[in-house]
Image (tube, coloured by chain):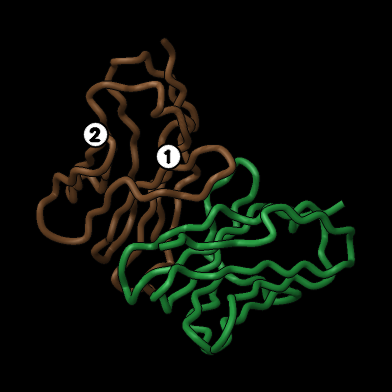
Amino acid sequence: NAGVMQNPRHLVRRRGQEARLRCSPMKGHSHVYWYRQLPEEGLKFMVYLQKENIIDESGMPKERFSAEFPKEGPSILRIQQVVRGDSAAYFCASSPDEGELFFGEGSRLTVL
Amino acid sequence: AQSVTQLGSHVSVSEGALVLLRCNYSSSVPPYLFWYVQYPNQGLQLLLKYTTGATLVKGINGFEAEFKKSETSFHLTKPSAHMSDAAEYFCAVTFTTDSWGKFQFGAGTQVVVTP
């Protein structure tokens, strides 16, 4: 059973561009979570999604950030008009119902 | 406000010595507590968790942690450190009033193991 797959693993964007990060949950997992890890900090919760529904987006910045988990395909975290402060590692996790969270290896975004 | 705090951002231990990583939380509602380990450029791996029941929890790789409600703590220990334990460790907490999976993570403790 493959783990949580995130891509790209590394992404470089210039200020003002868009970043799209993808997450394929483990097989059979219907719950997806996105976390952001800034340098020298712990992970910060961003959003919790189930198929076609945003359950809790209390950690998402109000502007430029959006997330989706469509009926088919991976979950997408989209950052529009990136700024240098968006440089971070973005981790996706999935779980089967309310069980253990399994984390992906992260996508590291660098904004030039 | 509900929060989690890890004491010590860096810990150095000798191989074979006790590993002790401290985690405290503040909350007025029951917590669910977790310890995760992160190796360089990898995701987080669950070491152990406390939800209900026995307060002494055993995890993988010889680690264990004890939930002490009176001290609002969930310290992680391992009797004898191994070189492979060098990694960053995160304490995490979620609360019964929050969405499952909405974890609050501590800032992490980097463990260095010396020969």
Which residue sits at x=28%, y=48%?
B48
Which residue is outermost to the top? Answer: B115
According to the picture, the residue beneath numbered tag 2 turns out to be B62
Q: Chain of mark 2?
A: B
Is residue A20 shown left or right of residue A16? left
Front disc: 2 or 1: 2
Q: Is residue B55 above or below residue A3?
A: above
Instruction: Label 2, secondary structure: give it.
Output: helix
Could you say which disc has been placed on residue B27 in the image?
none
Q: Is residue B59 in view?
A: yes
Q: Is residue A110 above or below residue A31?
A: above
Pick the front one: B35 or A101:
A101
* Image position, residue A87 (x, y; %): 74, 53
* Image position, residue A2 (x, y; %): 46, 61
Is residue B47 shown left or right of residue B62? right
In the picture, which quadrant includes the N terminus of chain A? bottom left
Task: Output the letter for the chain in green.
Answer: A
- Tag 1 or tag 2, which sits nearer the N-term? 2
Chain B colour as displayed: brown
Q: Quadrant of residue A67?
A: bottom right
What amino acid type is highlighted by mark number 2? Gly
According to the picture, the residue beneath numbered tag 1 turns out to be B89
Q: Is residue B1 in view?
A: no
